[in-house]
Image (spheres, grey):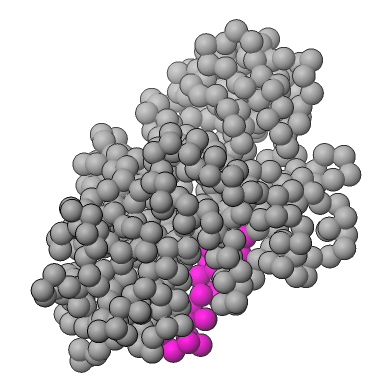
Amino acid sequence: MDSPEYDVIVVGGGNAGLCAALSAREHAARVAVLERSPEEERGGNSAFTAGTMRAVYSGLEDIRQLVPDLSEAEIAETDFSSYTADQFFDDMARITGYRTNPDLCEVLVTRSNEALHWLRRQGVRFIPVYGAQSFKVGAKRKFWGGVTVGAVGGGIGLVDSLHAAAARAGIAVFYEAEARRLLQSDRVVRGVEADVAGKTTTLRAGAVVLASGGFQANAEWRTRYLGPGWDLAKVRGTRFNTGGGIRMALEVGAQSYGNWSGCHATEWDMHAPDYGDRTVGDRFQKHSYQFSVMVNNEGRRFVDEGADFRNYTYAKYGRIILSQPGQVAWQIFDSKVAHLLREEYHIKGATKLKAATLEELVARMEGVDGRQALQTICEYNAAVKKQIPFDPNVLDGRGTDGLAVPKSNWANTIEDGPFEAYGVTCGITFTFGGVKINPEAQVLDMADRPIRGLYAAGEMAAGVFYFNYPGSSGLTCGTVFGRIAGRNAAALAKAN
């Protein structure tokens, strides 16, 4: 392979990278994507998501523009609600402990709606995510939590649609292409050196966009930056996100930024493989925990399962489970809520126990102090505020009284068999530390000056998420800043 010239080179072939490439192609002729994985594993972490996207929307008419084939029956029986910019801002501020970079957050929120409509123009189709984000109470199904639509086919459907758009646009995609070093002269990034199918290759360009993910698949970096025990976490997504893009940017003077000791980590099946399985996708997750009682190996509750909607707690509870004895926990449900369990609870191979009695159930929970678990459940049952109605669509206030670890909402007694228990551990999704960018997606140096010719988007563009994460905002963030990075990279290349 010779050393071709491109206007823009994008490192990374997930959602953020492909959005950057497509945006660049709208303004420049020669665009290339370097995808580290082989073609059959393309798409980075995006391929392992549910494809759902958080965005500002005004109500039914906005949803109909994104999902034009909604049936009249679906419209009649569904309350699609709305999600305002103020709500999105408030969620971002509250969930990140008010640390989110205000300038980057404003870009994310205010451009979230147009990002989804832009994706539709690229050929991405959306559907309402009924099963994951709504419950039917009475005659109406109501959406909650600010997430209403997702890509048809989930994460793989999103990636495949974007790759199809890239092919139509004439964007060159190189697989098994690992970028190793940024080419820089006179403080300007002018291309990359990469290993392409085993051959060291120099690719020169007018600008480079880095969108190669965080360092969650790098056990050594996880332990170095997240802390002891993180080498034991399972990786929810791709094995290729090891921090290479972050390293290359730092080597040319980029400013490290964001929550380097923080990450998105969820409740994940305790017997899932060490890395994500594309045939299963995100279904190793176990995200109906808000209706459970969750105990550790000591048989004790350790977290408020109903502190908030799942969207606002699931990305931080994985860290808490990692700190429990054996890095595991069990979610326990009784028959009253079995119909509310999400689809992922029914997959083949889930770590699931079912029993007619609680005594039989806890006896089969390997490694758990069964006697203490029964006492914990007994004390919990006695503390439930049974006089408050249960409603899964709202923060119903049906909590507990007098427990050291309260349950704030959706507290139902665990007393009606048959009973089910699901074993979970920590699954890390992506890391929150990376490099600093400005609202134009330019990578900044230690003096907050743009490094000319270098842009970033996606997981490695830090400063948006701290400590926790409002569900489904990651893909939106990748799309928003990918579009900006691609457009500005193309403009710079044309100006040179």
Which residue is rendered at x = 32% and y = 42% of the image? 259
In magenta, the rendered stretch is: 150-171
Q: Can I make out residue 345 in this image?
A: no
Q: Would you say 36 lies left or right of 487 here?
A: left
> Magenta residues: mostly which secondary structure?
helix
> Is 208 placed above or below 259 here?
below
Residue 170 included in the magenta stretch of the image: yes
> Is 345 placed above or below 405 here?
below
Q: Can I make out residue 321 in this image?
A: yes
Q: Would you say 64 lies left or right of 325 here?
A: right
Which residue is rendered at x = 18% and y = 82% of the image? 202
Residue 253 lies in what quarter of the image?
Answer: bottom left
Query: Residue 495, how many percent across, how many down?
Result: 29, 83
Q: Nearer the viewer, residue 403 or 205?
A: 205
Q: Nearer the viewer, residue 328 or 212?
A: 212
Query: Residue 447, how many percent across, how many down?
Result: 18, 53
Which residue is rendered at x = 30% and y = 64% of the image? 442
Residue 459 lies in what quarter of the image?
Answer: bottom left
